[in-house]
C-alpha cells in the first residue's frame, strides 16, 4: 500500500534512456560489418575456411560478440537508476544489489545544470546535474527530454517553502 501511495504522489518518474546509445552501437557494428564483408569479398576471402568455418562467419560472430559486449554497461545503468520527482523534492535511487536512495528537498536545492552533447541534442537526451547546498552534485544520466524535466524540477525545487505556525501561547507570568 505504501508503494502505491508513493507512486500517486510522483509528478515524474524516469530511468536512463539508453535506446539511442543501443541504436548507435548497432549502427556502428552494422557499418563495420559492411566494410569488413566488402573487404573480404573484394579480396576473395569470404568463403575461405578458418578452423572449419568460413571467414565471413568468423567476422559475423566477432562483430556480434563485440556488439553484445558493448551493451551490459548501458543495461546496468538503466537497471540501477531511477529518478522520481514529487511535490516535496526529488529522489534518486542507485544500485542493483545494494540500493542507495538520495533525496533532495527544495530547502537543500542550490542549482541545476543540463548538459547535452551534439548527439544527445539530436535524440533529445542529456544529463541533469543537481547541486545541493551541501556541495554535493547529483547526476541524472541519459534523461529523455532533459529541458522539459529540468523545468519540472525547477518548478518543484524553486517553490517557496511556507511554514504555518500554530497560535502563539502567551504565558501570563512572563507577559
Image (cartoon, rainbow, N blue to C red):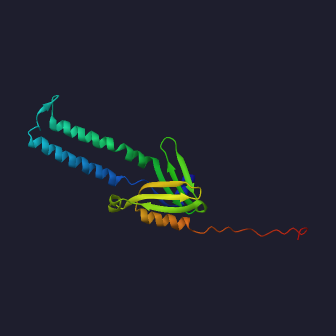
Q: Is residue 39 visible?
A: yes
Q: Considering only vertical position in the picture, is 47 above or below 13?
A: above
Q: Residue at x 49, y 45 (%)?
A: 95
Q: Considering only vertical position in the picture, is 73 above or below 132?
A: above
Residue 53 position, x and y percent, is 16, 32
Residue 135 relative to residue 123: left or right = right
Q: Considering only vertical position in the picture, is 125 above or below 69?
A: below
Residue 67 relative to residue 105: left or right = left
Instruction: Pick out the residue farthest to the right.
Output: 173
Kindly indicate the quadrant of the structure image that contains residue 122.
Answer: bottom left
Residue 8 position, x and y percent, is 53, 60
Kindly indicate the quadrant of the structure image that contains residue 71.
Answer: top left
Q: Residue at x 57, y 68 (%)?
A: 159
Residue 46 position, x and y percent, is 12, 38
Residue 70 position, x and y percent, is 32, 44
Residue 172 relative to residue 157: left or right = right
Q: Is residue 1 visible?
A: no
Residue 41 relative to residue 169: left or right = left
**If the image is split into quadrants, where does the C terminus sit?**
bottom right
Q: Residue at x 57, y 53 (%)?
A: 2
Q: Residue at x 56, y 63 (%)?
A: 87
Amino acid at each position: 500500500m505504501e508503494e502505491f501511495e508513493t507512486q500517486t504522489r510522483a509528478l515524474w518518474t524516469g530511468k536512463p534512456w539508453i535506446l539511442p546509445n543501443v541504436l548507435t552501437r548497432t549502427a556502428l557494428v552494422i557499418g563495420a560489418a559492411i566494410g569488413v564483408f566488402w573487404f573480404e569479398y573484394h579480396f576473395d576471402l569470404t568463403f575461405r575456411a578458418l578452423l572449419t568455418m568460413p571467414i565471413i562467419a568468423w567476422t559475423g560472430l566477432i562483430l556480434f560478440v563485440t556488439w553484445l559486449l558493448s551493451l551490459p554497461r548501458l543495461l546496468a545503468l538503466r537497471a540501477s537508476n531511477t529518478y522520481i520527482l514529487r511535490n516535496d523534492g526529488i529522489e534518486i535511487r542507485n544500485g542493483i544489489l545494494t540500493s542507495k536512495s538520495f533525496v533532495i528537498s527544495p530547502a537543500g536545492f542550490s542549482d541545476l545544470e543540463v548538459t547535452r552533447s551534439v548527439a544527445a541534442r539530436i535524440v533529445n537526451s542529456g544529463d541533469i546535474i543537481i547541486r545541493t547546498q551541501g556541495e554535493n552534485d547529483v547526476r541524472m544520466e541519459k534523461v529523455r527530454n532533459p529541458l522539459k524535466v529540468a523545468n519540472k524540477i525547477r518548478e518543484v525545487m524553486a517553490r517557496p517553502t511556507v511554514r504555518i505556525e500554530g497560535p502563539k501561547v502567551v504565558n501570563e507570568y512572563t507577559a
